[in-house]
Amino acid sequence: MNGSEASRRDSGRDGGARPTIKAVAAAAGVSTAAVSQAFNAKGRISEATRRRILDAAAELGWSPSATATALRSARTRTLALVVRRPTDVLGADPHFSELITGLEGELAPRGYGLLLHLVADVAEESALYERLAAEGRVDGAVLTDARADDPRPPLLRGLGLPAVLLGAPHPDAPVPTVGLGNQGAGIHEAVDHLMELGHRRIAYVSGPGELLHTGLRRAVFEETLRLKGVEPAAVLSTDFSEAAAVAATEELLGMTERPTAVMYANDSMAVCGIGAAQRAGLRVPDDLSVVGYDNLPIGRWLHPRLTTVDQQVQRVGAAAARALLAQCGEDVPHVALDDRPRLVVRESTGPTDRPAPPITSSPPYGKT
């Protein structure tokens, strides 16, 4: 036995305290979740890694207690929803309230609870899933905000945790995806609506660039305009916060040729944009037309009421809950999401008084 092995044995057995799963993970050079997988025969770890973990555990004299093993094998009837948003942004964005309402409408009647966590970045989120899996605290997770090269689906698959990813259906995704189809249709309808009202200087205020839906919607916005022979007045990215939405709106209104219409990536930012425009002395929609995205209740309470794209947030949340419950072995009905985002026209959009050139004809975007 070499010196490091002796030291490792001494620290585990002779220090007086019972060795821990963290000590085993450190000795084997793996995560605590991997140690759990090695002993529970769950997840996907190589035989070499499993053997290294078992050897380290034997050397330290550690084994999972019978109580802990029973707890891990039992159902917690709890599902995780982890959101990468600052607390102030989450509190001000009713989107997640609508999503949680949809989830809870399916979970609560079946005796399941929802564990909500806020994290700052993908590294913190991944570490949280590993901890939740190692401690056996949840039966599965709902993933939000799909990204390119998203590390979370393969991580959860490796941890043996059922998961669903909110977003456009994708047959090659590592975990089931839940969302409306033809995601660009609502943006296309919104652009068409504004152009029919005579708008040609149309700007777009998007969310963070790394999100898949940000790139998709922005691409549809730009493509729809250009197919009609018009260039976007501006495209600005934000972090979805109130301050960023107001700053983006003020920047747009300060342009030499300011936009006559602005589309926002969600309803909360659109509400902030309307407020910023009104404080600048502009009338909505007489001087500036505004379009949101989500169709949240706040859009109906506002004056003028908000024109927006309905993406059926509650319905998507309910479908995600059913899909995850089915993975957990529950007998739940499958209800297909066979619709697409659709424009809801209200009072925040109106004709522009500026002369507009003719619209170049273009084919409709997608199918109804």
Image (spheres, rainbow, N blue to C red):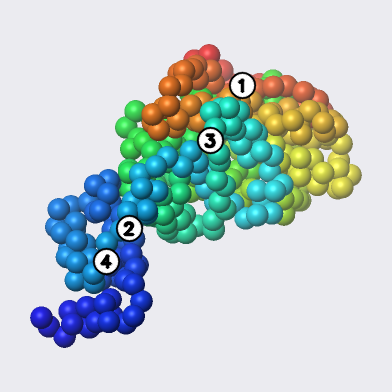
Residue flagged by tag 4: what amino acid is it? Trp
Badge number at residue 65? 2
- Residue 86 % position (x, y): 62, 55
What amino acid does circle 3 point to? Answer: Tyr
- Dividing the image into 4 quarters, which one contains the N terminus? bottom left
Q: Are marks 2 and 4 in contact (CB under 8 Å)?
A: no
Q: Is residue 71 left or right of residue 40?
A: right
Q: Which mark is residue 62?
A: 4
Residue drawn where x is 82% and y is 44% of the image: 275
The residue under label 1 is which amino acid type?
Arg
Q: Who comes first in sequence, dot 2 or dot 3?
A: 2
Residue 325, how many percent across, how many down? 45, 30
**Badge 3 is on which residue?**
112
Residue matched to label 1: 342
> Which numbered disc, 4 or 3, marks the residue closer to the eye?
4
Mark 3 and mark 2 in contact (Cβ < 8 Å)?
no
The first of marks 1 and 3 along the sequence is: 3
Contact between marks 1 and 3 (CB within 8 A): the answer is no
The secondary element bearing badge 2 is classed as loop
